[in-house]
Amino acid sequence: MTKKFSQVFILLLSVFVVALHLFLVIKYSVNAPDLDDYDAVLKFANGFVQEKSIVAKTQSMFAQHNEHRIFLDRFFIVVNLVTIGTINFTGLALIGNLFMILMFLLFARIFKEFVSTNWWLFFPVPLLTFSLESFENFVWAMASMQNVGVVLFAVASLYFLLRTREIVVGDFVIAAILALLATYTSGNGMLTFIVAAIGMVSMKKPLKWILLWGAISVVGVVSYFYGYHSVGGHPDPIATITERPDQLISHFFVLLGCIADDLAISVFLGFVFSVLFIFLILNGVHQRRAVLFFILCFFILSSCLVSLTRGGFGVGQAMSMRYRLYSELIVLFFYFLVIVEARLDGYRRIVVGLFFATVAFLYIRSFSQNIPEMRARHDNLAQGVAHFNAGNQIFHLSYPDQIHAHYVLTKSLALGIYKLPSINLSDLERTTVEETLPEEEGLVQSAFEIDSTNGQLFVDSASTFIEGQKASDISVYVVIKNEQETLIFRTVRYLKQRETSDRRDVSWFTQLKGLSDGKYALGFYVKTPQKNAFDFTGAVLTVASGKLTVQQDPHLKCKFSVDAFENASDSIHVKGWVFVVNADAAKIGRKIILRSGSIEKAFEPEILVRPDVSAAYNGNYDLSGFDLRTPRDNFSPGRYALWLEISYEGVIKLIDTKSNLEIKK
């Protein structure tokens, strides 16, 4: 009776967890590209459909994407094109989630064969496998297929190859095919060959089969690296090892323990897992529990490979959501090994019960922490689509280089291989929040643009920050306030190719018909882990009968002139003057910003003495002049607009000079 009840309970729990998982994936997915989707999906598909040669089409499926060869992703992209004719990003993400379900069923098979027949002990498996801590792997099309697919194929390969001490020819063939698929799904997939070879030697498999596996491994690895090229912008692993070994080790520990979602605790857990792994080796667990141990070994070596290739980015990078799946599965297979090695009696039952409670707590907590992030991602993509459909086709695509994203997307639309969802700005939800605003302290710095189009109020291109706080740690809200009410709105973050990372670029809009007539003060409310801050911008919005007028901060009334914006022999030359009316020019901060699409470069100019400006405007504006010469090699070809960023007494104002320059190589 108890055994039957446990089976029914675990079955119902698993069905519930999987159903809830799929519901959230569908609810928060948008049929729109995100980040690497522009290159890995759309750019590939553009080239594939235009390629006439079958050989060239096949080669493109095996071509390198960053440091990986993502044949699996491209295979399903082609299937998508052949079956329904257009790319569907939600459908591609669901393929990755199908891999998740298959992986979960494989874990159930492994549990039954190698761990226990007591199904109560299976309780943590669905909660760890489908935790929202790694939701990026569920709703992001290319990442879902790649990151989940490689785990599925690697685990399945090791299972078929090592589940028996004798060689079964059919299992060996399946394992080899799965190892090749893992390799051509993601770069760490080739570790399957290495881990499996060590497992075969440890289990004393026949030498001829070990040599055959070695030969297949050589073919897989050599073919992977044939024509391989290094990826620009990525840290050099050798430099990371020799120059920053402490950072490398910390990065590795964080990767192992990032299930904790706290940097310090993750480092500690990673250290504990490393010690436990060594303890298991010294106790010969790899010989007694080959399948469980070597699957765990694959996850740990994959983390090691990530640290070698990405550790140079910094320890914080190891907390990226897409890596947490490995940490969760490391915990799961440590649990399997502990269960099968230890007798569950006395205090050990209490320890297991505490582990169950911890896993259940982490699973439930993952909803409160990550559903807002899933919603924010959904809103970001939906707003990008709505802006594109409205004709605002730049600055709202989910990709750092907006010009490149725009080119790829418009080409896909022209070729008919992708259709944007019919999302309009009027369809988007106006989301207000209840917050208690702190007192103004002058900490929030911002630069923004205000516009009113078709009865909608936009606060856009808003660069909002608190000095010293990273953009990734900032949440920004728009506040509009009058005597009767205070409205606090969520914003949507958009990406911008910047040279600094301390600013959070956001956009927000609402229907003017939802605002009562009157005057509203505009402010920004910024939340960080260390401090919340709020300040008004000085801008006043006047709404009357659905029409908007804007009065900017009267204390930041600026005058300027651009005397030169030109191509010099090998440099770009900018010269002119700018001042804030009735302010000492010596106390004004200024930057020169050159924009081309989403590319933005900011420079500190040389200050020039301009007594002529003081004489002309009867003020203390001698230090209002500026001069900049910067090498032309700093710029990609394109048409650049000249902006001035003026800061005074904690207020920042952006000035569009209306000056443009075509920069050519």
Image (cartoon, rainbow, N blue to C red):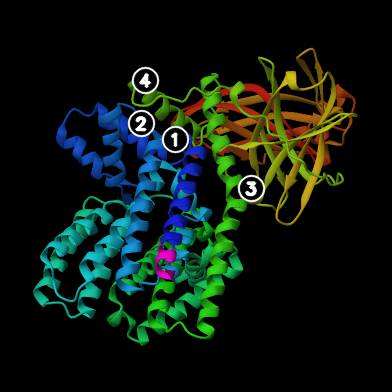
Residue 87 image label: 2
Please name the residue shown 42% across and 60% down the image: 8
Magenta includes 357?
no
Label 1 vs 3, first from the N-terminus: 1
State which mark lies toward you, 2 or 1.
Answer: 2
Residue at x 67%, y 41% (from the top left corner): 604
- Between 65 and 578, the one lying in front of the other is 65
Name the chief secondary structure element in magenta: helix
Q: Earlier in the sequence, mark 2 or mark 3?
A: 2
Write the start and end of the magenta stretch as one range.
1-7
Q: Mark 1 — residue?
A: 33
Q: Secondary structure at mark 1?
A: loop
Q: Is residue 271 above or below residue 584?
A: below
**According to the image, label 4 marks what residue?**
414
- Mark toward the start of the polypeptide (4 vs 2): 2
Chain-order first, disc 2 or disc 1: 1
The amino acid sitting under disc 2 is Ile
